[in-house]
């Protein structure tokens, strides 16, 4: 739900800018299922990125390495 207060809308938009940056506005998805899975994946990687960034001073992030760690623990 979008708020009528401009400040709150900006917070919502800033939270999802990493998702919006990945897609061109004209690019669409074939199904809602594909869109949902893609967005969940992007948000998961972004959450891992934010978590790692908070804990390390010399921070280097690799999506490939993080996914390898997740697969190894599963």
Image (spheres, rainbow, N blue to C red):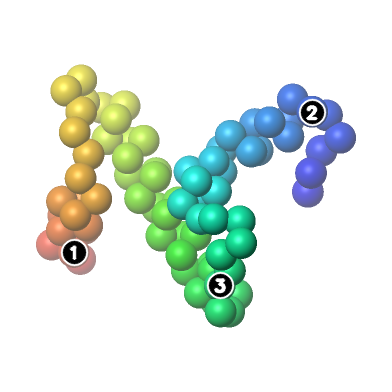
> Is 25 situated above or below 3?
below
The answer to which image quadrant residue 14 occupies is: top right
Q: Which of 73 and 39 is in front in this view?
A: 39
Query: Which residue is found at the position 58% from the left and 69% from the top?
Result: 28
Query: Which residue is found at the position 33% from the left and 36% from the top?
Result: 51
Using the image, tell me which numbered label, if any, was put on residue 71. 1
Q: Give the alpha-carbon distance from disc 3 to disc 1, as whole Å.
A: 27 Å
**What secondary structure is found at the residue carrying circle 1?**
helix
Point out the tag, 3 or 1, that comes first from the N-terminus: 3
Query: Which residue is found at the position 61% from the left and 56% from the top?
Result: 25
- The crowd level at tag 3 (other Cα within 10 Å; few <14, some 14-19, many 20+) is few
Q: Residue 29, image x and y in percent? A: 56, 72
Give the residue at the far bottom of this rendering. Answer: 31
Does the CB distance between marks 1 and 2 fall below 8 Å?
A: no
Q: Residue 2, image x and y in percent? A: 79, 44
* Disc number lying in front (3 or 1): 3
Using the image, tell me which numbered label, if any, was put on residue 29. 3
Q: Residue 66, image x and y in percent? A: 21, 50
């Amino acid at each position: 739900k979008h708020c009528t207060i401009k400040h709150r809308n900006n917070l919502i938009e800033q939270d999802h800018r990493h998702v919006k940056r990945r897609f061109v506005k004209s690019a669409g998805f074939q199904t809602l299922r594909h869109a949902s899975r893609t967005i969940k994946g992007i948000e998961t990687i972004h959450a891992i990125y934010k978590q790692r960034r908070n804990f390390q001073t010399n921070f280097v992030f690799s999506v490939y390495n993080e996914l390898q760690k997740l697969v190894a623990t599963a």
